[in-house]
Image (cartoon, rainbow, N blue to C red):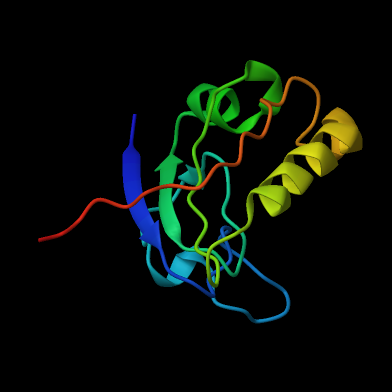
Amino acid sequence: MRLILLNKPYGVLCQFTDTAGRITLARYVSVSGVYPAGRLDHDSEGLVLLTDDGALQARLAEPRHGVEKTYWAQVEGTPEASAIEQLRARHAAAGPVAGGGAGAAPVRPRPLTLPSLR
């Protein structure tokens, strides 16, 4: 089994080919036969796991398996509590399809306090 951890840069598609000529994982990963276990949007950056183990890839990527994932989002300014509550309500009202498919874990947005680097 092969496992590759990649810090996917901003502006890179989380796939190996693209008919529109955009930058893909192929620019950064020369290992054949591995696929992302999940995905990040084109305009996101972060850790992506690539594997050649189809069962592991499916277990991690398919919402029905209920594997919880954590995403950090950087936003301009400090969001008001009402904006966070609105995001929670919008996701709950959208239902499982819009929220990630059957069995998808609930979204629990919350502000984070970053640790001091001093």
Whether residue 28 is situated above or below residue 111 in the rendered picture = below
Percent position of residue 7, x then y: 36, 58
Q: Quadrant of the N terminus?
A: top left
Rendered position, 80 above or below 18: above
Q: Quadrant of the C terminus?
A: bottom left
Residue placed most toward the observer, 51 or 115: 115
Q: Residue at x 54, y 75 (%)?
A: 11
Residue 66 relative to residue 70: left or right: right
Horizontal side of 75 relative to 96 (left or right) equals: left
Residue 95, image quadrant? top right
Residue 115 left/right relative to 74: left
**Which residue is drawn at the image coordinates 46% and 29% (left, top)?**
53
- Marks counted in the figure total 0
Query: Which residue: 66% across, 28% down?
Result: 62
Place of residue 61 in the rendered image (x, y in percent of width and height, measured from the top left): 60, 33
Percent coordinates x, y for residue 34 in the rendering: 45, 45
Where is 33 relative to 66, above or below? below
Farthest residue to the front: give it: 81
Farthest-out residue, bottom: 21
In the foreground, 115 or 72: 115
Q: Nearer the viewer, residue 4 or 70?
A: 70
From the top left corner, tell me how far across and down residue 10 is, in percent: 49, 72
- Name which residue lies at 37% across and 49% down: 113
